[in-house]
Image (spheres, helix red, strand yellow):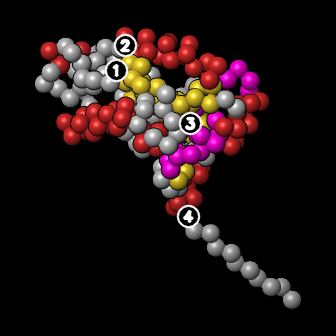
């Protein structure tokens, strides 16, 4: 659920969607991998503290916590690097939690009113690896996906990479070049123009 960093949601759908997401986040089981949880530990103590710092910064800048935002209360998890799935609501586009990569289970929720505003907000990031568009209107989805500056855009689904035939790579600070697919071969080739004049 929380593989992405930012969620842009139309204002008319905001309350219902956030309520459903909060219910889902609160119901997720956090624990060690051997117990087959919904979410395992953070990679290190340092990264756990970084995540806690970002949530504190978000709250300090005016975001509200709709779910999570703390270490689990279960004493059995006290010695591990665990953090609850977190929804930061009422995030504005200029906040650090909307502009910086947190690398943790934190989703920054930003509202929009018009489609052009959504595209502008999606592109108002120094990163552009993966994006997702959810809509019932396929024409709108295709139009929006062509305007989003991201290496991959998924429509009504979300994932990173896909099969070996799908090029993978980002825009802006999310990378240079492409892996996989025919496009990846370009990085292993040099183009040479040989011109011969026949009299």
- Residue at 51% across / 61% down in the picture? 188
Q: Over which residues does the magenta segment extend?
A: 118-138
- Asked whether the residues under the numbered discs 4 and 2 touch, taking CB atoms below 8 Å apart as contact, a structural biologist would say no
Give the mark nearer the N terminus: 3 vs 4.
3
Q: Which of the two discs, 1 and 3, sits closer to the camera?
A: 1
Residue 123 appears in the picture as rendered: yes
Q: Is residue 109 above or below residue 177?
A: above
> What element does badge 2 sit on?
helix
- Mark 3 lies on a secondary structure that is strand
Question: In the image, residue 179 lies at what x, y percent?
Answer: 50, 49
Q: Earlier in the sequence, mark 2 or mark 3?
A: 2
Q: Residue 26 bears which disc, if any? A: 2
Magenta segment includes 131: yes
Q: CA distance from mark 3 to mark 4?
A: 29 Å
Nearer to us: label 1 or label 4: 1
Label 4 element class? loop
Q: Is residue 4 visible?
A: no
Ranked by sequence position, the earlier of labels 1 and 2 is 2
- Across and down, in percent, residue 122 comes to 59, 40
User: For the residues carrying marks 3 and 4, which lies nearer the camera in this image?
Assistant: 3
Q: CA distance from mark 1 to mark 4?
A: 48 Å
**Nearer-the-camera pick, 24 or 40:** 24
Residue count near mark 3 (Cα–Cα under 10 Å), binned few <14, some 14–19, many ≥20? many
User: Which of label 2 and label 3 is nearer to you?
Assistant: 2
Tell me how far mark 4 sits from mark 2, CA to CA.
50 Å
Q: CA distance from mark 1 to mark 2?
A: 7 Å
Question: Which dot marks residue 68?
Answer: 1
Q: Earlier in the sequence, mark 1 or mark 3?
A: 1
Residue placed under numbered mark 4 in the picture: 189
User: For mark 3, what is the residue?
Assistant: 131
Rendered location of residue 111, percent (x, y)? 58, 29
């Amino acid at each position: 659920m929380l593989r992405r960093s930012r969620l842009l949601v139309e204002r008319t759908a905001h309350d219902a969607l956030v309520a459903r997401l909060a219910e889902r986040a609160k119901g997720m089981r956090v624990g060690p991998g051997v117990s087959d949880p919904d979410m395992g530990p953070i990679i290190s103590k340092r990264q756990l503290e970084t995540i806690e710092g970002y949530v504190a910064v978000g709250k300090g800048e005016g975001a509200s916590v709709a779910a999570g935002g703390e270490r689990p209360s279960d004493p059995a998890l006290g010695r591990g690097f665990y953090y609850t799935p977190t929804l930061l609501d009422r995030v504005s586009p200029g906040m650090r939690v909307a502009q910086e990569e947190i690398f943790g289970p934190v989703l920054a929720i930003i509202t929009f009113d018009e489609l052009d505003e959504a595209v502008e907000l999606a592109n108002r990031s120094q990163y552009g690896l993966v994006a997702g568009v959810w809509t019932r209107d396929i024409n709108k989805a295709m139009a929006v996906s062509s305007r989003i500056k991201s290496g991959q855009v998924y429509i009504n689904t979300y994932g990173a990479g896909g099969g070996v035939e799908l090029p993978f790579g980002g825009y802006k600070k999310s990378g240079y070049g492409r892996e996989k697919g025919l496009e990846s071969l370009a990085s292993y080739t040099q183009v040479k123009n040989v011109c011969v004049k026949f009299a």
